[in-house]
Image: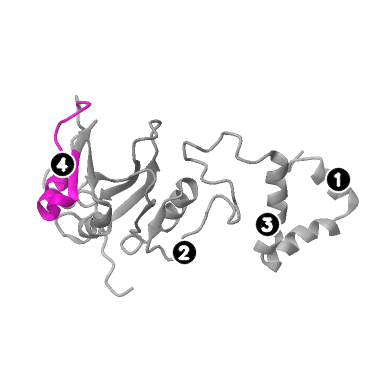
Amino acid sequence: MTTKFEIVRPGSGNRSEPVTPKNVPNRGGEANPSGTALKEHFSAAVLRIDVVNGETTVLVETSKVLDIVRWLHDDATQSYEYLSDVTAVEHRDLSRPIEVVWHLRSIKFRRFLRLKTQLAKGAKLEVPSVWPVYKGADWLERECYDMFGITFAGHYDLRRILMWEQYKEGFPLRKDFPLRGRFSRSEQLRQALDANPEAKYSMEELNVADAFEELPLDMRARIASGEKTGE
């Protein structure tokens, strides 16, 4: 580490004690002050600010995502230390753009902020990676890429994380993805076998699997029958 580690205490940047909100309106209400600060600092890059059920969502230009996230993280008046999620939304109305969503939390100020940007259908599905700011974005962005096909430019190792790397059926959380998959079950099995999953394991992991063959026949039979420990 190049800088001294500092403990961030919840609410340490607020002078008042936290109060549980009551009678929160569905639309409108008090906005997160970070929304106004973003509008003042980034001007035209902030397209819209919405407050729904007490949560503030800021719609921003795609090209400015990394700059905005970096400012929210680094600026002492914002201090969004924690990226809790990166995801996407594709609406039933396929004419609507795909939305990429970032959930940010400031532990210091006890604030939650949702950032969104929109990607038009038919255009390149690419947004800037926020991994340079939040190292925790690594697997979050890989999952979003794996499920939605959204590319995070600048990610150092963008590849599938839930599906295998040779998976050819597309992106399972897109609305055009069929519930039973694009290929027949036999074709899915053939592709899985062609992937040679054994090649992905170390020799130590393979030795554990090979050890089964060295067990006594009666023990192998009990394991194969599904017998549980203690039965």
How busy is the neighbourhood of tag 2: few (under 14 within 10 Å), some, or many (20 plus)?
Answer: few
Q: Secondary structure at mark 2?
A: loop
The residue that label 3 is drawn on is 195
Q: Residue at x 35, y 59 (%)?
A: 129
Residue 157 bears which disc, if any? 2
How busy is the neighbourhood of tag 3: few (under 14 within 10 Å), some, or many (20 plus)?
Answer: some
Which of pointers 3 and 1 indicates the residue nearer the eye?
A: 3
Q: Amino acid at mark 2?
A: Asp
Q: Secondary structure at mark 4?
A: loop
Residue 17 bears which disc, if any? 4
Q: Is residue 42 magenta?
A: yes
Residue closest to the far bottom: 2
How busy is the neighbourhood of tag 1: few (under 14 within 10 Å), some, or many (20 plus)?
Answer: few
Total numbered labels = 4
Q: Secondary structure at mark 3?
A: loop
> Which region shows up in magenta?
25-49
Image position, residue 166 (x, y; %)? 61, 55
Which of pointers 1 and 2 indicates the residue nearer the eye?
A: 2
Q: Secondary structure at mark 1?
A: helix
Q: Are marks 4 and 1 in contact (CB under 8 Å)?
A: no
Spatial distance from mark 4 to mark 1, Cα to Cα? 63 Å
Along the polypeptide, which appears first: circle 1 or circle 2?
2
Q: Amino acid at mark 1?
A: Ala
Q: Is residue 55 magenta?
A: no
Q: Residue at x 72, y 49 (%)?
A: 190
Spatial distance from mark 3 to mark 4, Cα to Cα? 56 Å
Along the polypeptide, which appears first: circle 4 or circle 1?
4
